[in-house]
Amino acid sequence: MRRLTGFHAIEEYLRSLKSLTSSGGRPAAPPSTRLLVSGSGPRIKSILELAGALSLRIERPSRAELDRLAPDNRGLALETEEGFEGEEADFDTFLLDPPERSLVLLLDHIEDPQNLGAILRSADAFAADLVLAPRRRAAPLSDAAFKASAGAAAYAPLALVPNLSEALRRLKKAGFWLYAAEMGGESLVGAEIAPRFALVLGSEGSGVSRLLREECDLSLSIPMAGHVDSLNVSAAAAVLMYEYRRRYS
């Protein structure tokens, strides 16, 4: 059983269900899903209205019982046997006709669910066209990752692939330029970036792997002016995506 807490994350998950339902997607809510409520207030009232529109099962355990089930709750929790992620994107379909201006992220074994969630939040904010992650040796889209994304994981176009090196080669064949985010790369300020832009983000400990770096056309770095010499991978991802959208808005 999986449980989601956090007002914003729950609201966005329910809105994603409502959007998919109205567009002819999946059913309003999986049968196993229920909203557990022990608190009150305007945010909880708003979430209850969303849940009611989806005919979601609502239960009211005692505060002590909800604290036992979901210790970090703020008066409510969403519980389901299924995942909170949205529908998985299809890499093969995307490659058939990618937009001339396309922003694609490749996550090279990001292992921290907080970083994964933050990257997916930025991917939604900057309208990334696709996010690719390996099926193995990477952080799963867990409850913690979904919460860290503030619900954006329900919208981010995430596709899981067996091999990132092969994915890079396929992107290159489709007309993408391939970039690795690295401290020693060319400064983002003066670098040319292509409209079909595929960016590899490395793991927290070792950065972009050698095999993927060798597939890339260029490495990019973010100029630093303070006392630290690098940014967290999720913060770096946000800066690089912003710069792409600034140039190709």
Image (spheres, rainbow, N blue to C red):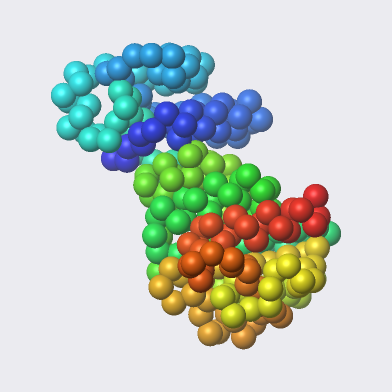
**Is residue 107 at least partly visible in the picture?**
no
Residue at 36% across / 30% down in the picture? 78
Question: With 116 as the anchor, is 177 left or right in this view?
Answer: right
Front one among 37 and 206: 206
Residue 95 falls in image quadrant: bottom right
Residue 104 is left or right of residue 248, and the answer is left
Left/right placement of residue 20 relative to residue 40 reads right
x and y percent of residue 118 in the render?
Answer: 49, 51
Percent coordinates x, y for residue 49 in the rendering: 48, 14
Q: Residue at x 66, y 57 (%)?
A: 241
- Name the quarter where the N terminus is drawn: top left
- Residue 126, position as x, y percentages in the image: 67, 48
Q: Quadrant of residue 68?
A: top left
Residue drawn at x 43%, y 45% is: 148
Q: Quadrant of residue 159?
A: bottom right
Task: Judge whether residue 127 can be spotted in this image.
Answer: yes
Where is 116 relative to 205, above or below? above
Q: Is 31 drawn above or below residue 166 in the view shown?
A: above
Residue occupying image coordinates x 56% and y 75%: 183
Residue 32: where, in percent of width, then height? 35, 31
How many marks overall? Answer: 0
